[in-house]
Image (cartoon, rainbow, N blue to C red):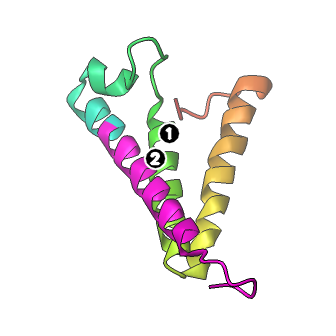
Amino acid sequence: MNSNGTDTRWIGWLAFAAGGFAFALGLVVLVGWCTENQILIEVFGSYPVMHYSTALCLIVCGVSSAALAMGWRRVGLAGGVVALFGAATLLERWGGLDLGMN
């Protein structure tokens, strides 16, 4: 309960569940890449293929979201890893560099 007398524990459970879903989705896509299973890589048939690096970032985001929901504050630094992946992807797209990420 917070100072207003309302129960806010559900927010932590929601963050934990969302982190678990992101982790599971990223893991499924990584398994798809390792087994070369196109159905697992595309996630939904009408969507484009999810890149390997995107699946890795989903796993990192899922773990850090679940950890933050459990009160582990230092794991929040994992967002920096995802930001580095994003910056590298922007360099690839806009800078014409080939970093071999996708």
Span shown in magenta: 1-28
Residue bearing mark 1: 53
Left/right of residue 35 with respect to residue 81 in the rendered view: left
Kindly indicate the quadrant of the structure image that contains residue 17: bottom left
Residue drawn at 50 percent across, 39 percent down: 53
Q: CA distance from mark 1 to mark 2?
A: 5 Å
Q: Where residue 64 appears, x then y in whole percent?
A: 52, 65
Residue drawn at 45 percent across, 20 percent down: 49
Numbered disc 2: secondary structure = helix
Residue drawn at 45 percent across, 48 percent down: 22
Q: Where residue 90 appears, x then y in whole percent?
A: 73, 33
Q: Judge by depth and name the residue closer to the eye, 11 or 58.
A: 11
Q: Quadrant of the N terminus?
A: bottom right
Residue 96 visible? The answer is no
Residue type at the position of mark 2 = Leu
Are the residues at dot 1 and dot 2 in contact (C-beta closer than 8 Å)? yes
